[in-house]
Amino acid sequence: MTEQPHTHEPVRLLKPEHPVGIVGYGAYVPRYRLPAREVARVWTDGTAGLPIIEKSVPGLDEDVATMSIEAARNAMARAQISPQELRAVWVGSESHPYAVKPTSTLVAEAIGAVPSTQAADWEFACKAGTEAMVAAMGFVGSGMARYALAIGMDTAQGRPGDALEYTAGAGGAAFVIGPAEESLAEIESSYSFVTDTPDFWRRQYAKYPEHGQRFTGEPAYFKHITSAGQAMLEATGTTPEDYAYVVFHQPNTKFPQRAGAMLGFKPEQIETGLLVPRIGNTYSGAAIIGLTAIFDIAKPGERILLVSFGSGAGSDAMVLRVTDKIAGKPGLAATTEDYIARRTEIDYAAYVRMRGKLEMK
């Protein structure tokens, strides 16, 4: 099959009529950790290379709904608004607990946003979280709502013994999108880049996702991340030197580091948001939870470039500028580092039980 050429049209940034930004943010990471060495011990007698240190694993009583509620409460604590002021609660995930029943209504009910709100679930593999954020930008920027809540959250997935089992973690983040003048970080612009590139998928009723092995790097991850990132730099007239931080989707440690180098960023610009070595690839929350770690230490005036990636495939790029309203916000809720530091190590047997990988009939 011959790849169809794409027309080189001018980059069309997604900018709402009214400036918007992030009013509140919050993260959540489960406390349980499975070391990568445990996976290697079981499947390769310890001989496999370890792509990360360890990954987060949900407890028996945790799923995307419960984790989203925790992150949402943290975001609302920092936003310091009433839940009744939210006009949308949107949850992006590829591991919603129900095939037919929204996660978003559970979250909206739990945080007190019902009944006068819009609720919906989003899905675009690993960029479902930024997809919800872009939609929230439009919702708020059009004047239809003053505040909207966008969440990206996932649980650990991966076939036993598969490469994904080393890195597929759990966790994510929530953001209250609101007017720029109230924001701790204004979203100056966004841009989306998509193609039909089937690098990763899971059919209905299939328990585990499939992936295209090395195909997931090129032409999937790197093409989309670098295309979206380069287009954003050119359209905004900025260079890597204009940014204090950059955060990419993190399926492993090497991919975001290589993508950063391809775009001209230095390792120190990537380090703060690079959480995958300690919690794994949190899928829909992978890029945006890195953004929460940056907000925990960011200073007014600093610029951040965020570029997500979702298999199938596409990337959302955003340029954010931290405002003076960041002052005091991190201390209003648990920080991302608080969740990462709070850990209980488990072995492979406990992991198998928690993730339901043994079926007894």
Image (spheres, rainbow, N blue to C red):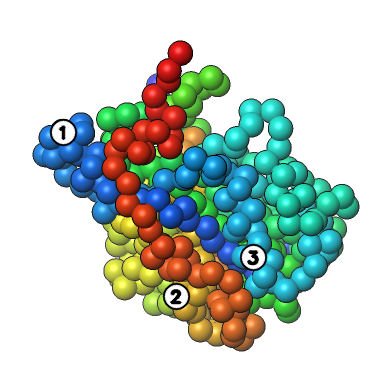
- Is 153 drawn above or below residue 15 in the view shown? above
Q: Which residue is mark 1?
A: 44
Instruction: Give the label, 2 or 1, closer to the camera.
Output: 1
Query: How many numbered marks does the figure carry?
Result: 3
Lower position in the chain sequence, tag 3 or tag 2: 3
**Where is residue 319 shown, x and y percent of the image?**
55, 67
Lower position in the chain sequence, tag 2 or tag 1: 1
In what quadrant of the picture does the N terminus appear?
Answer: top left
From the viewer's perspective, tell me whether residue 139 is left or right of residue 223.
right
Q: Amino acid at mark 3?
A: Ala
Q: Which residue is mark 3?
A: 75
Q: Which residue is mark 2?
A: 243
Instruction: Name the residue rendered at 56%, 79% in the picture.
Output: 331
Q: Amino acid at mark 1?
A: Thr
Lower position in the chain sequence, tag 3 or tag 1: 1
Instruction: Name the residue rendered at 61%, 51% in the picture.
Output: 68
Is residue 241 among the parts visible in the rendering? Answer: yes
The picture quadrant where one finds residue 37 is top left
Q: Callout 2: helix, strand or loop? A: loop
Asked if disc 2 and disc 1 are in contact, CB closer than 8 Å, the reply is no
**Where is residue 194 shown, x and y percent of the image?**
53, 42
Is residue 306 among the parts visible in the rendering? Answer: no
Instruction: Name the residue rendered at 18%, 38% in the picture.
Output: 41
From the viewer's perspective, tell me whether residue 124 is left or right of residue 343.
right
Q: Check residue 111 in the rendering and tell me which mark sits there, or answer none.
A: none
Q: Amino acid at mark 2?
A: Tyr
